């Protein structure tokens, strides 16, 4: 069916200190029906350790997954060819990521390079050029951030958590939880290099813990989710200069909540009207409406994910559905996005997936 989408779920196949149980078999492939929000199981790709974060190239031909490991084990970026008819993945190759706890992977907009953030140790950010067959070359650029933020757990040193290029593919920013910064680089896509440009780095409020961020579809704003204080920082973005300016900070948790603050992922709808974030501990999706002129957010409330520890979630390309991955209850739950209000509506669609972490879509 031409309207069917492919959906891939990255998982934990083995436990880590922050993941008490893990029993997935690898990367799971599903057919997703954008008319109903239902998933149909297609395949699982094994022989890969902890393929937690996955991403698909713009043409839907290749998938890249990091192997997130600790304890001195070598971490990898794994490359696969996608069979668009069956959803099956064919392994191409893998390369070391030169760090521990590789936790994020994306592709620059030229399609020439994979960018990886390493959380625990080693190189904070690395670049791996993409070969003609979709495989990855060895690391062509590496850099380790230095410094620390306030004296608290998880901010004793650099912890890279997310790396994203701007829409023009001129600048790349790394969200570093440990030093409370969005660290800026210039991107040399042709040569697979990042050029440090610290004068455009952005300092976030001490103790915030920047984790994930997204650009608005028009590139005018950046929405940054801070893990440690569960807030969203709204920033304006000057694409020509590659600079940001903070505009607003808004809580991603209900007023009066005094439980664990463990914010995880942030997404924006394709039309730029709504922003969503996930809360582990509170086990919810925070919903926000975007003011198109100022970029500011207004809270729309919170929706339970129907499970525990929603590590990641994603919005389908039509902007009609939000799928939340409940890591500790082995489910992916489908919500309908109300097109007028942006509020999430329960559908009753629950798909069993072992220890799910991240979700990536591509057209089939």
Image (tube, rainbow, N blue to C red):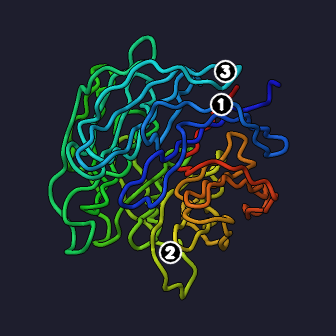
For the residue pair 6 and 224, the one nearer the viewer reads as 6
Q: Nearer the viewer, residue 275 or 141?
A: 141
The reply, left or right, for residue 307 in relation to residue 14 is: right
**Relative to residue 284, is residue 127 depicted above or below?**
above
Q: Earlier in the sequence, mark 3 or mark 1?
A: 1
Q: Residue 21, how many percent across, how many down?
A: 48, 57
Q: Callout 3: helix, strand or loop?
A: loop
Q: Which residue is mark 1?
A: 43
Separation of marks 2 and 3 at Cα, in angstroms = 40 Å
Relative height, residue 122 to residue 328 (above, below): above
Residue picked out by circle 3: 84
Q: Residues within 10 Å of mark 3 (few under 14, many from 20)?
A: some
User: Which residue is nearer to you in this view: 312 or 92?
Assistant: 92
Residue behind mark 2: 251
| Residue 51 locus on image (x, y percent) | 46, 39
Image coordinates of residue 30 in percent, x first then y, are 69, 35
Q: Are the residues at dot 2 and dot 1 in contact (C-beta closer than 8 Å)?
A: no
Identify the residue shown where x is 21% and y is 68%: 149
Q: Which of the two discs, 2 and 1, sits closer to the camera?
A: 1
Which quadrant holds the N terminus? top right
């Amino acid at each position: 069916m031409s309207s069917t989408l492919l959906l891939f779920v990255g998982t934990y196949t083995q436990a880590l200190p922050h993941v008490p149980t893990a029993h997935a078999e690898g990367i799971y492939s599903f057919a997703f029906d954008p008319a109903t929000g239902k998933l149909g199981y297609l395949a699982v790709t094994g022989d890969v350790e902890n393929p937690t974060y996955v991403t698909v190239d713009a043409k839907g031909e290749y998938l890249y997954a990091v192997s997130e490991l600790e304890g001195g084990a070598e971490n990898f970026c794994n490359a696969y060819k996608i069979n668009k008819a069956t959803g099956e993945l064919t392994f191409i190759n893998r390369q070391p990521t030169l760090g521990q706890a590789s936790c994020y992977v994306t592709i620059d907009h030229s399609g020439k390079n994979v960018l990886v953030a390493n959380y625990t140790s080693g190189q904070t950010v690395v670049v791996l050029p993409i070969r003609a067959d979709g495989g990855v070359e060895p690391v062509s650029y590496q850099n380790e951030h230095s410094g620390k933020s306030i004296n608290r757990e998880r901010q004793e040193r650099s912890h890279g958590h997310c790396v994203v290029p701007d829409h023009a593919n001129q600048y790349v920013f790394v969200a570093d939880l440990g030093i409370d910064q969005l660290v800026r680089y210039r991107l040399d896509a042709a040569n697979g290099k990042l050029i440090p440009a610290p004068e455009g780095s952005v300092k976030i409020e001490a103790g915030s813990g920047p984790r994930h961020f997204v650009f608005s579809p028009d590139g005018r704003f950046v929405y940054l989710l801070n893990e440690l204080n569960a807030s969203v920082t709204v920033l304006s973005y000057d694409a020509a200069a590659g600079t940001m300016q903070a505009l607003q900070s808004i809580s991603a948790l209900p007023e009066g909540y005094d439980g664990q603050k463990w914010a995880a992922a942030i997404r924006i709808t394709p039309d730029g009207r709504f922003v969503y974030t996930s809360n582990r501990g509170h086990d919810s999706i925070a919903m926000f409406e975007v003011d198109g002129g100022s970029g500011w957010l207004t809270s729309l409330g919170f929706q339970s994910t129907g499970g525990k520890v929603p590590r990641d979630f994603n919005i389908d390309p039509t902007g009609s559905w939000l799928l939340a991955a409940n890591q500790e209850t082995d489910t992916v739950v489908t919500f309908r996005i109300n097109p007028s209000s942006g509020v999430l509506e329960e559908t009753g669609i629950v798909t069993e997936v072992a220890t799910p972490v991240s979700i990536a879509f591509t057209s089939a």
